[in-house]
Image (cartoon, coloured by chain):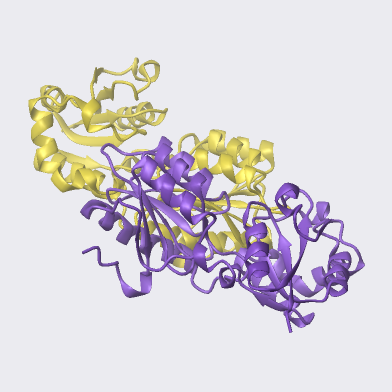
Chain colours: A yellow, B purple
């Protein structure tokens, strides 16, 4: 029996892509777009409703009304202030259940949300289960490959990103010829890339490394790379981007590869656990 | 016999303060101000000469001409590009001796510079050996002390800063109620504070933690806090600053404490090795 997939939609193009993919697989979809984050234009072709982030009661009853068995959380949402959230009665109950997790890092908060949605009877699935074309296996995408110095910088960046990730700090860093130019925390990848350009060191080179945090709830907050990431990396003078194979969503794989080719950047999917990829 | 202290001066007020302190201790001083970094006004009262950063030959002969036995490296300098450095003949030899260290992190480069100056016959001393009033022992400065949440954030920030420091990434981070808002790499403390304000999480609180990197060459690059740091921390909505006792220069201790009092911030010197300070 076909299930209905409920999509809790933040910003960007991915919520509509998950809808397309689920639809193509013969499933019904119903999208809840969060006011102020979801893109109404891309949701328009799909059955959807927009709700305030704090209106959890409305959200749960809509999901039940549309017989959603599975849920996908996808698209960026800025963590709201408690003051601006204005929770409805159900929202207040969920806030109470989140409890201490509200004051944890992103990982803790999102993991708690996924747990609560599970307790409410939904099966929470990862966007990558639908968007398997957006997830890359290990290897180079496009024609440009990292040179020896870039591979060295990627190796160092992996060590840095894993160390940061274990502390639930962030997913990425920029390394240029052995020097860590910038490290991502709450500001996000694009802001980090912007300042990397401003604090480049003498010489060429530089790579962005982006990894899933160890223990990160990937059903709620998978690292994402889009054409804009490539343009920002290029503007910062970098040579390319290394991201985690299997654990990174390319918002538009073809557009990412095309942009990398146009800008002369490499784009490489790596498996940090298996060591560096063979480029032979 | 009184020695002459040679001061290699980057920016800010500290080079002149080292000169004052050495003079007060009965030593002669001679300052070499680096073009584009040193503040000519504050150097004016002292015997000094300005040289290009690349003019190492000129620098060494000036130091020998003025019989400098001891050297102090003090005041910020942006790492120059090799292209813009235009080394003289001696400068080129020193670049060759730096070799791979040129492409290392700051720690590696500065440690190599200190080693080479030692090989040239100078005794390289730390600014803190002169500015002992600018270095604080463990404890709270001023009237405001961190509350329980701030102490918790300081503890977490110490863990983060030590982890970053071991990777030679940076000296500081900002933590708000358990969430790491920002981590310092090459952009420096002020830029990190500015973005911390922009990515604050719901709720009050927040601390800046600044520590010496483990193994950092403190004769060349000691963490520094000034009244501007306090104003920037306040602008970012933070409650206060925790810095490493004995290993941080307060550019102007009285002005720092006055600014903390005026802004209602705490300012606490901690000894990370000894655990958190007793506030009783």
In what quadrant of the picture does the C terminus of chain B appear? bottom left
Residue B46, placed above or below residue B204:
below
Residue B214 placement, left or right of B96: left
Of residues A248 and A221, the one nearer the viewer is A221
| Residue drawn at point x = 65 percent, y = 45 percent | A265
In what quadrant of the picture does the N terminus of chain B appear? bottom right
Of residues B227 and B76, the one nearer the viewer is B227
Q: Quadrant of residue B211?
A: bottom left
Q: Position of residue B48 (x, y in %)?
A: 80, 59
| Residue drawn at point x = 73 percent, y = 80 percent | B2
The answer to whether residue A224 shows anywhere in this view is no
| Residue drawn at point x = 70 percent, y = 51 percent | B42
Residue B73, placed above or below residue A64:
below
Residue B214 placement, left or right of B5: left
Q: Position of residue B109 (x, y in %)?
A: 67, 68
Q: Quadrant of residue A81?
A: top left
Residue B202 placement, left or right of B126: left
Q: Position of residue B64 (x, y in %)?
A: 85, 75
């Amino acid at each position: 029996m076909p299930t209905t997939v409920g999509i809790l939609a933040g910003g960007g193009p991915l919520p509509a892509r998950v809808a397309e993919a689920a639809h193509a697989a013969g499933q019904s979809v119903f999208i809840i777009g969060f006011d102020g984050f979801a893109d109404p234009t891309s949701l328009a072709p799909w059955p959807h409703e927009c709700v305030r982030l704090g209106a959890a009661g409305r959200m749960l009853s809509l999901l039940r009304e549309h017989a959603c068995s599975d849920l996908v959380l996808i698209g960026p949402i800025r963590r709201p202030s408690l003051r601006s959230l204005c929770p409805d009665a159900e929202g207040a109950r969920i806030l109470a259940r989140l409890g201490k997790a509200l004051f944890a890092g992103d990982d803790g908060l999102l993991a708690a949300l996924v747990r609560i949605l599970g307790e409410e009877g939904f099966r929470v699935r990862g966007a990558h289960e639908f968007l398997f074309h957006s997830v890359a296996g290990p290897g180079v995408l496009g024609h440009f490959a990292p040179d020896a110095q870039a591979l060295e910088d990627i190796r160092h960046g992996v060590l840095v990103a894993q160390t940061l990730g274990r502390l639930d700090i962030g997913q990425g860093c920029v390394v240029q010829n052995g020097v860590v130019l910038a490290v991502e925390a709450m500001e996000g990848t694009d802001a980090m890339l912007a300042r990397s350009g401003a604090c480049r060191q003498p010489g060429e080179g530089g790579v962005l490394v982006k990894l899933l945090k160890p223990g990160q709830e990937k059903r709620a907050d998978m690292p994402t790379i889009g054409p804009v990431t490539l343009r920002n990396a290029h503007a910062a003078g970098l040579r390319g981007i290394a991201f985690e194979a299997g654990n990174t969503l390319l918002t538009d794989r073809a557009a990412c590869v095309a942009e990398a080719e146009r800008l002369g950047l490499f784009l490489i999917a790596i498996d940090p656990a298996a060591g560096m990829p063979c480029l032979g």
